[in-house]
Image (tube, rainbow, N blue to C red):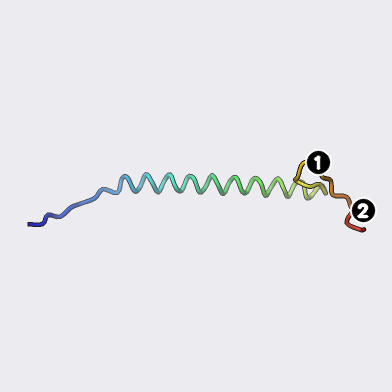
Amino acid sequence: MLKEVYHTTDELYKLRKLVSAYEALVRAGVRCIKQKSAIYRAEHKSHKKGEIISEMKSNQ
């Protein structure tokens, strides 16, 4: 004879919360990198170490 089985969703809920937190953390990291790059671009500098973007270089 078959019995009904009820599975708890507690484990799935915890997993979804962890995945959601991880995705939020990754998005926040990407947002910070893009903001940093935008700040450097506004100052006519490269986000790469040691490079400076000058208006004279772009005119040549």
Confirm or deny contact between disc 2 and disc 1 (CB under 8 A).
no
Q: Quadrant of the N terminus?
A: bottom left
* Kind of residue indicated by mark 2: Met
Mark toward the viewer: 2 or 1 = 1
The mark found on residue 30 in the picture is none
Q: Residue at x 92, y 53 (%)?
A: 56
Q: Amino acid at mark 1?
A: Gly
Q: Residue at x 44, y 47 (%)?
A: 19
Q: Which residue is mark 2?
A: 56
Q: Name the element at disc 1.
A: loop
State the residue at coordinates (61%, 48%).
Answer: 30
The secondary element bearing badge 2 is classed as helix
Measured as percent of width and height from the top left, residue 20 is found at 46, 48
- Indicate the position of residue 44 as horizontal and vertical percent values: 83, 49
Q: Return the mark for residue 50.
A: 1
Q: Is residue 31 left or right of residue 55?
A: left
Looking at the image, is 32 positioned above or below residue 4?
above
| Crowd around label 2: few <14 · some 14–19 · many ≥20 (10 Å) | few
Between the residue at mark 2 and the residue at mark 1, the CA separation in whole angstroms equals: 17 Å
Residue 43, percent across and down?
A: 81, 47
Mark found first going from the N terminus, 2 or 1: 1
Picture coordinates of residue 7, whole percent (x, y) = 24, 50
From the viewer's side, name the closer residue of 51 and 24. 51
